[in-house]
Image (tube, rainbow, N blue to C red):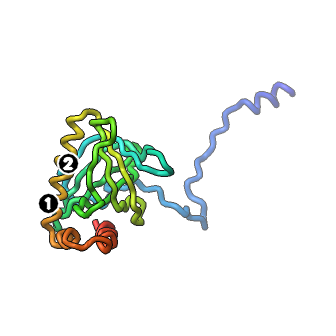
Amino acid sequence: AAQQEQGGEDEYVPEEEIVNIPGWSPSVNLEVQAVVETGEENEEDTYSQRSKLFRFRDGEWKERGLGDAKLKKDKMTGKIRFMMRQEKTMKVVANFFVVGVSPYCELAPQAGSTKTWMWSVMDCAEEEQVNEKFALKFGTPELATAFKEAFDDAKRHNATIPEFAALGAGVGQGDAGKVKAEAGKP
């Protein structure tokens, strides 16, 4: 009798999968989307290079993300913005218009490195505008030089757009607010 009880526990009993419970519906639908909109559909890349972004916080440089640093041109307005997504998570780590309004978007080499550029900007990566100081590091000095040329070209291009030209012609302190207002509009 003891053997029959043990044998009964080890026997395979087929179970039926329950796929529908009457009166209950899932609160989340896990359908796979064919297309995921990123907000970049109406833009073309004018520059793209893998690099590492750092942000100056609490008195030190902290890594913000590794991914493709891109200059993106809006097909309708012609405005060029800098955008970078974290490589693995696709989280936006930098998002701002490239403008020639001091002190924003003025590239300066990082002391002791020919592969890194630093600048200040009104960044909108986290939905609200924040004054940030960034450093972008490249694999070689040549890649860093190519970025500077593309970044400066983007500043010159944006200066020809009436909204940005008005910012550059402003008189100092009021410009920061204008840059903030424009930076939130991709």
Q: Residues within 10 Å of mark 2 (few under 14, many from 20)?
A: some
Q: Is residue 132 above or below residue 170?
A: above
Q: Is 154 left, or right, of 134 in this rendering? A: left
Q: Is residue 137 above or below residue 158?
A: above
Front residue of 68 and 167: 167
Q: Amino acid at mark 2?
A: Tyr
Cα gap from disc 1 to disc 2, whole angstroms: 14 Å
Residue found 38% across the figure and 49% down from its top: 90
Res. 41 in view = no
Q: Secondary structure at mark 2?
A: strand
Please identify the quadrant where the N terminus is shown: top right
Residue 97 lies in what quarter of the image? bottom left
Task: Estimate the x, y position of residue 105 in percent, counting from the top left.
Answer: 27, 56
Front residue of 19 and 110: 110
Task: Estimate the x, y position of residue 35 in percent, counting from the top left.
Answer: 31, 56
Residue found 31% across the figure and 66% down from its top: 183
Tag 1–tag 2 contact (CB < 8 Å)? no
Q: Amino acid at mark 1?
A: His
Task: Estimate the x, y position of residue 82 in percent, counting from the top left.
Answer: 27, 55
- Return the disc, 1 or 2, that comes first in the chain's sequence: 2
Front residue of 107 and 68: 107
Residue 87 lies in what quarter of the image? top left
Q: How many numbered markers are drawn?
A: 2
Q: Secondary structure at mark 1?
A: helix
Q: What residue is disc 1 on?
A: 157
Please identify the quadrant where the C terminus is shown: bottom left
Q: Which of the labelled discs sits on residue 107, or is there none?
A: none
Q: Residues within 10 Å of mark 1 (few under 14, many from 20)?
A: some
Q: What residue is disc 2 on?
A: 47
